[in-house]
Image: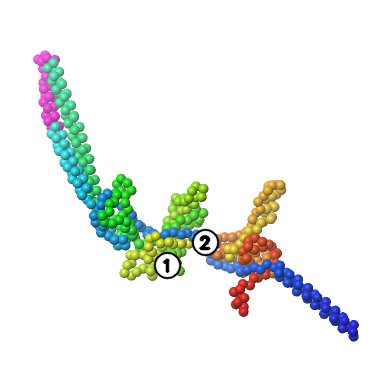
């Protein structure tokens, strides 16, 4: 009986030791396992975007500068005023241009008088020529008959040739006088045009979006140089955002792409837009060593997306003002119902087989850079399993997986330093319980 008690005691003792050792081993394995964050791969809609910052501007904005210089004697509009095409905007002092026109008219009259004199001279020269021609022909006949001397014949011939030259000279004088008249008429027309240009009218319908001058200021015309920009008239019904897009992203953007627009002045509000224009020529910034190459892209803000902000009594005005800051996300490509994972889950590891193949091709003694392969880590049976993947487009949070995994797999997404650097195939892992999840379970 005592022997049975001793055997039972040893059985319990051995079982306790085994249990204790199992607990210790399990604890050690648990301590060695990496705590990870996991998300399931899902099918989603992935929208690839290009983000850029810019300014809100009217689609149509006309800069108005005077053609002539002078003092503004009348300024008939104010900034923000709506105008129609042909509306009188301003007047420049016309006195100097009126005097110039009068001088040009006087010069024209002088040239016309000179033309009349030239015509009279031609008539006189023609009469003299006809008389000299008749005398020459008569003396020529008399000279043949020996009725006059050679000297008398030469005198008649000389007078005839002089008269003919006078006619030709008078003809040329008339031609020159006619050109002078045309030149004077052009000068009168130019002076008249300059006089008319002292009155400035609106070239288009719109709103005075900028007014840079005051009555009494002097402005410089654009006839000979860059003139003074007096004002701008814009069509505020149609607004756009001008942004600069880097050369690496511009190839993905097409005219007609949909855009989501955020304007700083309207917090928590998003507007719809469409790409209307992409610049063909680049803009460069910075020194040659650090140049940044961008292309200007214009995005029209669709009126339907802000119709509730338009004032009923001022339908011609936009809720946006020129110069407002805006951020746009241009949607360049969309993939529907595709397998996706969080961006941070995709990492790279060396493809040893491909690297070995490259070494063989180059010769084993040659130095070859390791061949990197995009992959994700999947949690299977409390271990990390590396799976090679082929990726597609991405949005701000998720990336498309073209091949390599299926929907519903447990994808290890964090910690980032573990996934991106140290996690290896077969490493033991344990699901990390976040504080929020612990609170929910309680």
Instruction: List the residue tagged with mark 2.
Output: 48
Residue closest to the far left: 147
Task: Give the foreground label among 2 and 1.
Answer: 1
Residue 147 sits in which quadrant?
Answer: top left
For residue 74, side relative to residue 303 (left or right): left
Question: Where does the image place residue 369, in percent across and percent down from the top left?
Answer: 65, 51
Q: SS of the residue at dot 2?
A: strand
Asked if the magenta segment contains residue 205, the reply would be no
Asked if the magenta segment contains residue 137, the reply would be yes
Please tell me whether residue 162 is drawn above or below residue 408 in the rendered image.
Answer: above
Q: Residue at x 19, y 46 (%)?
A: 99
Please tell me whether residue 390 is drawn above or below residue 3 in the rendered image.
Answer: above
Instruction: List the residue tagged with mark 1.
Output: 266
For residue 403, side relative to residue 144 (left or right): right
Which quadrant of the rendered structure holds the C terminus? bottom right
Residue 211 sits in which quadrant?
Answer: bottom left
Which quadrant of the rendered structure holds the N terminus? bottom right
Quote the CA–CA distance across marks 2 and 1: 24 Å
Question: Where does the image place residue 224, in percent across and percent down from the top left?
Answer: 30, 45
Q: Residue at x 18, y 26 (%)?
A: 165
Residue closest to the far bottom: 1
Mark 2 burial class by Cα count in 10 Å: few <14, some 14-19, many 20+:
many
Q: Which mark, by number, is residue 398?
A: none
For residue 426, side relative to residue 124 (left or right): right
Name the chief secondary structure element in magenta: helix
Q: Residue at x 23, y 55 (%)?
A: 73
Please tell me whether residue 179 is drawn above or below residue 98 in the rendered image.
Answer: above
Q: Which residues are magenta?
A: 122-150
State whether residue 406 appears in this view: no
Q: Residue at x 22, y 48 (%)?
A: 97
Earlier-in-chain disc, 2 versus 1: 2
Give the camera-side residue of 124 and 319.
319
């Amino acid at each position: 009986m005592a022997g049975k008690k001793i055997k039972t005691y040893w059985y319990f003792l051995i079982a306790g030791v085994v249990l204790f050792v199992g607990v210790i081993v399990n604890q050690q394995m648990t301590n060695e396992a990496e705590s990870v964050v996991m998300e399931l791969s899902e099918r989603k809609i992935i929208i690839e975007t290009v983000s850029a910052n810019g300014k809100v501007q009217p689609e149509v904005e006309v800069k108005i500068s005077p053609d002539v210089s002078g003092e503004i004697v009348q300024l008939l509009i104010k900034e923000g005023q709506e105008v129609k095409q042909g509306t009188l905007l301003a007047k420049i002092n016309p006195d100097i241009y009126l005097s110039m026109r009068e001088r040009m008219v006087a010069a024209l009259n002088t040239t016309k008088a000179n033309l009349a004199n030239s015509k009279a001279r031609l008539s006189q020269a023609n009469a003299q020529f006809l008389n000299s021609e008749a005398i020459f022909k008569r003396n020529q006949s008399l000279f043949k008959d020996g009725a006059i001397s050679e000297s008398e014949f030469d005198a008649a011939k000389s007078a005839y040739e002089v008269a003919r030259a006078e006619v030709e000279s008078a003809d040329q004088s008339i031609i020159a006088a006619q050109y002078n008249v045309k030149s004077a008429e052009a000068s009168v027309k130019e002076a008249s045009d300059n006089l008319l240009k002292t009155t400035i009218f609106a070239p288009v319908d719109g709103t005075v979006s900028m007014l840079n001058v005051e009555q009494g200021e002097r402005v410089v015309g654009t006839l000979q140089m860059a003139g003074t920009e007096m004002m701008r008239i814009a069509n505020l019904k149609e607004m756009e955002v001008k942004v600069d897009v880097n050369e690496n992203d511009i190839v993905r953007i097409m005219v007609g792409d949909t855009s989501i627009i955020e304007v700083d002045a309207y917090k928590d509000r998003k507007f719809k837009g469409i790409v209307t224009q992409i610049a063909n020529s680049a803009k460069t910034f910075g020194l040659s060593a650090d140049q940044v190459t961008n292309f200007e892209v214009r995005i029209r803000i669709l009126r339907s997306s802000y119709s509730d902000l338009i004032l009923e009594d001022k339908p011609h005005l936009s809720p946006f003002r020129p110069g407002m800051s805006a951020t746009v996300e241009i949607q360049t490509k969309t993939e529907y119902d595709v397998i996706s994972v969080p961006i941070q889950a995709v990492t790279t590891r060396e493809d040893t087989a491909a690297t070995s193949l490259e070494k063989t091709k180059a010769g084993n003694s040659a130095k070859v850079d390791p061949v990197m392969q995009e992959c994700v880590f999947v949690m299977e049976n409390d271990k990390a399993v590396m799976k090679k993947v082929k990726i597609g487009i991405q949005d701000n949070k998720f990336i498309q997986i073209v091949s390599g995994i299926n929907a519903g797999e447990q994808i290890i997404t964090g910690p980032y330093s573990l996934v991106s650097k140290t996690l290896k195939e077969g490493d033991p892992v344990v699901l990390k319980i976040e504080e929020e999840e612990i609170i929910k379970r309680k």
